[in-house]
Amino acid sequence: MGTYRIFKGKSVFLKLFGSYLLILGLTLAVEMGISVQILTASRKQVETLNKSLIQLVRNECDNQIRTIYRSLDVLALDEKVQSLSNVKGEFRPNNQYKAFALYEELQNMRFSSDGYELLYVFFRNTDSVVSASGNMSLEMYHSLYYKNLDITLEELRDYLSGQHYHDIKIVSAAERTGAIMFTMTSLNTEAGGTDATIVIQITPDMVNDRIESVKWNEDVRAAILNSENEFVNSVVFPEAGGLTYESAPIDTNFSICLNEEDYIGIAMKSTEADWIYVLMAQEDIIEDSANQVKKYCLAGLGVCLALGFLFSYYLTTQNYNPIKGLMELFRKRQKDQEDNTGLLRENEYQWLENQARRFFTEHEDIQRNLSRDQKRLKDFCLYKLLTQPYEELDAVELEVLNQSGVTDGILRVVFLSVGAVREERREEMADAAEDMTQELKLFIIKNVAGEMLNEVFPSEMLDTGKAVIALIRLDAMNTDNYDLMWNALSRAFDLIKEKFQFCMQICAGTAKEGVGGVHLSYLEAKETEEYAALLDTYYINYNDIRNRSKRYYYPLEADSRIINAIIAGKPDIVIRCVNEILHTNYHENHIAVKLLTWLIYDLLGTVMRGADEIGCSDFFEQYWKDFEGFEDLSRKSLEKIEEQFAELIYALCGEAEKRKSGGDTNLADKIQKYIRENYRDPDLNISQTALHFEKTPAYISSVYKKQTGKSLLKLITQMRIDCAVELLQEGKSVNDTAVLSGFRDSRSFIRVFKESTGLTPGQMKKE
Amino acid sequence: MRKKNVLAVILSAALAAATLAGCGGTDNKDGLQTGNSQTGSSQAGSSQTDSTQAETGSQSGTALTYWCELNQNVSANYSNLGETPFGKEWQKETGITVEFQHPPANQGSEQFSLMLADGELPDLLEYAWMNYPGGPEKAIKDGNIYELTDIINQYCPNLRKYLDENPDIDRMIKTDEGHYYCFPFIRGDDRLCNTIGLMLRQDWLEELDMEVPTTIDEWHDVLVAFRDKKGATAPLSWEYTMGSLTSANPFAYAYGTCREFYLGDDGKIHFGPAEDGYKQYLELFHQWYGEKLIDQDLASLQLDQVSAKITSGQAGASIGWAGSRMGTWVNAAVQTNPDFMLVCAPYPTINKGDQPQMGQIDNRYPNQGSVAITTSCKDIEAAAKLMDFAYGEEGHMMFNFGIEGESYNMIDGYPTYTDVILNNPDGWSVAQSLSAYIRGNYNGPFVQDIRYLEQYYTIDTQKESNLIWGATNAAKYKVPPVTPTTEESKEYSTIMNEINTYRDEMTLKFILGDESLDKFDEYVKTLNELGLERALEIQNAALDRYNAR
C-alpha cells in the first residue's frame, strides 16, 4: 500500500513537473519570438530614424549653407564693397564713412543671421578688413580673431587674395574646434572690380548643434565629410574605416566596422556643397534598445507566469481540496452525529481516517450482508420454484436461479427431515441426541447430506425450518443414477446416525425433466413425507406411496348427523357415527397418521359445535382441563381413539342433561348480588366477577345472558348510572359522583353517562 | 481531478503568455518612440536650462520670484544668482526664500517686454524702470507694479530712514506725482558717479618728457608726439560704438557741450549737439582725424580692437572707465611690456589753468538695477522686507562687501576684502569673485559703498581717478532723472529717436569729413525740424515738475 502510494505520487509530480516545463518552454519560445521581432523592428526603426535624421541634418545644414551663400551673394553685389575694393593703398577719410556704413550693414547682417562667427570683407588693395566687429587692418583682424586657428596671416592673406565663388575652406585648430569659412570674391560690375573677398565664418559647433538637436540617441554620430575627406564638423570618426567622400554609398544603409565596433551607417550628398553627410549608429544601440524591451517583456512574462501559477494555485485550493471534500462528504452523511465537531476540527486527518475506517468496515459488512442476501434470495427463489408452479415464477427469479446453477436437467426433490424415533429403536439412541434442537439437527442434515450428494450430483440444499429440501440434478433418468443418489443419501444417513445419534427421514419425489418439473417433484416429496409417520421406514420413495389415498372420508351429512344427535341428546348415535367414520378411513382408506389427526380434530370440532348448540360451549374449557387423552391421539390405535370419543360424548351429553335441569339457575342472582355490593369499586368488571365465582369470563357472561337475557356488562354499567343519577339529584358534584358511583374517572363517567342517558351529568343535575 | 488541474494550470499560463506576447509587441514600438521623443524633448529642454533650472531651484511655499538680468561676471561661474554665496546669504539673512529668474544674456529688455505682454510677472522685477515705456508712473497705472509709498512707510524702516536723510535722492526716485515705484540702486558717494575719463600712456609721456596734458593744445602736442615718435597709428582710440563712452567725450565737454541734454547755467535743459560748442568740438575732431591723431577706424571701434591697439601701442590715449578699461589694459599689457602704464588725465580745458566745468557724472540714482514689486506678488510684506534689508546696516555691508570672515574682514574699522576676492584661489578675476559675493561692483537695490571702489582699484593711478576726473562742476550740468509725463512720453521718444540717429550720422560725417562743417547750421536746422524744440519743451517741463517734487 505504502509503495503504491509513493509510486502514484511520483507520477503526479512528474506530470506536474512536465507541465511546468511545458509552460517554461512556451514562455521561452514566445520570448525568443519577441526578441527576434524586436531586433528586426529595432533595426528597421533605427534605419528609418537614421534616414530621417540624416535628411534633417542635410536639410538643416544645406539651409544654413544656402543662407550663407545668399548673404555672400548680397555682399558680393554690394555697392559699398565694390567701391571700397577700388581704393588703393589705404582708406582715405572720405572712404571711412562708406566703410562705417558697410560695418553697420555687416553688423546688422550678423545680428539677423544668428550663428555667423565672423562676417567680414577683405579688401586686397588696402589690406584692410571691414567686419561686423569693426574695421581694421587684416593683420589686426587676424591677431584678434584667428589667433587660435591654424592659419597664419600670410596663408590667410594668400587665400583671401584668390578668386573664390561659394568656396568653403575648413580651418583646423589646435585646441578649440576649427572653423568653416565660406568665401566669395565680389563680383565685377560697373561700380568696381573683384578685389574684395567676403568671408562668412561659422564654427563647426553650429553644425553640430543642429545635428545634436535632431539626434535620437547620444551614441549616434553624424559627420560631414567634404570632397577632400576633411571632417567639416568637429566630430571625427575613430579610424574612418576607409570611408571617403568617393567611396561612401549614398542614400543606402550600410554596415561598417570602425574601431572594431559595428555601425549602421547612411550617407547623403549635400545639394549645396561638395559635402556628404554621414550618420553612424552603433549596432549596440539597436541591441541595447532591443534588450531593454526584451528585459521588460521577460519580466512581464515572468510576472504573468507567476500570476498564472498563483491564480491556478488559488483555483486549485478553492476547487480541489481532497481533505475538505472528503470531510464534507462524511459530514453530510453524518449530519446526525455532528456532536463531535469540535473534536474533529482539532485533528481532521485522524477524524477522517476513523471515518474512512468505519466506512470501509461498513462496506465489508454490507458486502457480507449482500452475499448472504443473495443466498437468501437464491433460497427464496428456490423455495418458490419448489412450492409454486413454474409458470408463476417471474423472469427475475428465474434469472437468479439460473445464475445459481439451477438450470434444466433431470431434477429430483428429496425431503430430508429429522426422523421420528421409532419405539423399537429408542434404546439405541443416546441421550445426547435428545438434547439437540430441531434447528441444529436440520443444520447437520443439510451439511452432511449436501456434502454427500454433491460428491455425486450437483445439489441445492434448502432449509425450510421443518425439513431440508434437496434439489438434485441427475445426469440421466436411469437406475444407476438413482442408486448413486440413494447410496449418497444412505451414507449421509449412516454418518448422521453414527456421529449425531439421530435418524434422518428421507422422502424423495420422482425425477422430472426440466425446471418446470421441480414443483411437481416437490409436491410428490411433500406428499411422501405425509406417509413418513405412517410407514415405518426412514426411506420413502414417492413411488412407494403413490397409490395411497390423500384424503380422509368425512362426508357433510355425517357431520350434521352427529350434531343433530348431540342436540337430541343421543350419545349412542353420535358414537356410532364417529366410529363408522374412523373405521372407514383407518381400514378402508389407509390414511396417513397426520390425516388421521386432522380427521380426529374434525370430528372433535363437530362435537364442539354440537355442544355449542346445546349451550354447553363452556363444557370443553372445563373438559380439556381434566382430559388429556386427545394429545397424542393420532399415534394411538383405533380402538383407543374410539374409546376416547365415546367417553367425551357421554360426558357432554351428561352435562347437557344436567344443564337442562337448571343446576346453575341461581348463578345469575348470585352475580347480581355480587355486583350490587361491589359496583362502587372501579376495578369491578366481568373478569373480576368471573374470578370471584371461579369461572371463565365467557362462561359467566354467557350463563348470565342465558338466564336473564341481559348482558352482564350492561348490568354493571346500569347499576353505576342509577347510583350516579341518585347522587346527582342529591346535589353531588360530577367529580364526586363519578368516584362514588364506581367510575374510574369523571371523563369516562361523562362519556358512559351520556351514552346511556342521552344527557351529560351536568344537564341531569340541572333538571 | 488532479489531471484536470494540471491542464488548467497549463492553459492559464499559456493564455497569460499569449496575452503578454501581444503586450510585448506594442511595448516595443512605444519604447522606441518614447525614447525618441524623450531625447527630442531633452534637447529642446537644454536650450532653456537657465530658466528651467531657476524655476526648479527652490520651490518652498513662501518662495518669492525675483527676475533680473544676470551680470556677465556672475554668469561666468554661476547660472543663477541664487547659487552664489551672495544669493544664499541674502536668503539666509532675511529668512525669505527667493527663486531667481534670469533672461538669456543680452535679451533683458526683450524678455521684459514679453513678460509685460504675457502678464506672467514675477513677484520682484529688477529693471531700469525709467525706461518703462511711458515712464514708471505708467507702469503703476498699467497695474503692473505697486505704488510703494505705503509699503515703504509700513515695512521698510531702513529705506525710509535713508530717504529721510537724503532728500535729494528721495526726490530722484519718485515720480512727478510723488509716487515711489522701486527699491532703487543708489550710488552712495559722488565719487562713485564719475567713473569715465581720459587716460594715456604714462611711460610714453615720461619717455617723451611730457606732462600730462590739461588743455586741448597740450593734448594735440601729446597725440602728435605719440603719432610721430612712438609710431602710434591711432594715437587716440576709444570704443566709439559704446554710447556711454562717446557721450562722455571730455573734448566736447571742454567746449561746454556734450552729445546729450545738459543743464545749462540758465537752469534750463539744453541739447548739446545743437549748440555752437558742439561745432567747435567737431571742428577739432575733424582736424585731428585728418591728422590721423584719432583712430582712422573710429566709427566702428569696438572693445577688442581698442584693447588690442592700446596694449600693443598702436594707440596711446583713450577714454574709458578706471576699472574695466584702465585696470584691465594695464594688467594685460604689463605681461609683455613691463613699462606699460596709463595715467589719468583731467578733463581738458581750452585755456591752461581753467577749472574744467562739465564732465562725465552719473546721477546718484543712475536708473539701473532697481526693483519694483509687481501686482502678481502675494506676499508684499515679505517682498518689502527682503528689499529693505539692503538699506540697513547689515544689508549694506553684505551687498557691498559680502560675508564677513569670508569675503572681507574688518581691519581697523575698514571692511577689507580677503584673498578670496583679491587673489581668488580659483583664478577668477577680481570682478568675478566680487560678483559672487556682492552686488556692489555693479548694481542692484542697495546703496553703493565707495569703499568697494577704493579696493577694487588696485593700481595707483586708478585710485587717483576719482580725484582727477572728479575735479569738475559736472554735477551742476547734469540733468537730474526727470521723466516726461505718460502722455508726452511716446512723442518724446519718437522725436529723440530720429534726432539721435541724425545726430550720430552727422557727427560721424563731420568728423570723418564726409560732410563739410559749413553745413552745421543746416544740420541744426534739421534737428529743429525733427522736433528738437518740442523735445526740449517736454524735458524742461519734466524738469520743472522734478524741481517741484
Image: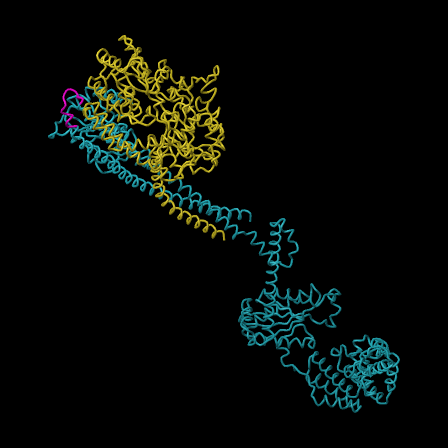
Residue A189 position within the rendered picture, expressed as x and y whole percent measured from the top left: 11, 30
- Residue A25 position (above or below residue A544): above
The quarter of the picture where residue B340 lies is top left
Q: Colour of chain B?
A: yellow
Comparing B264 with B202, the one in front is: B264
Residue A123 position, x and y percent, is 17, 24
Q: A339 and A180: which one is in front?
A: A180
Q: Which residue is drawn at 17% across and 26% down?
A: A197
In this rendering, the count of numbered labels is 0
Position above or below: A581 against B420: below
Q: Is residue A153 visible?
A: yes
Residue at the extreme left of the image, as rendered: A190
User: Residue sitting at 60 percent across and 73 percent down?
Assistant: A386
Chain part drawn in magenta: A81-93
Residue A262 at least partly seen: no
| Up-down relation of residue A420 to residue B56 (above or below) | below
- Residue A37 horizontal side relative to residue A3, left or right: left
Shown in cyan, the chain is A
Q: Is residue A91 magenta?
A: yes
Task: Depth check: give the residue in front, B15 or B162.
Answer: B162
- Give the residue at the far bottom of this rendering: A568
A267 vs A129, nearest the viewer: A129
Q: Quadrant of the C terminus of chain A?
A: bottom right
Percent from the top left, x then y, of residue A415? 64, 72
Is B56 within the magenta?
Answer: no
Q: Residue B33 in the image: state x and y as whole percent.
A: 34, 41
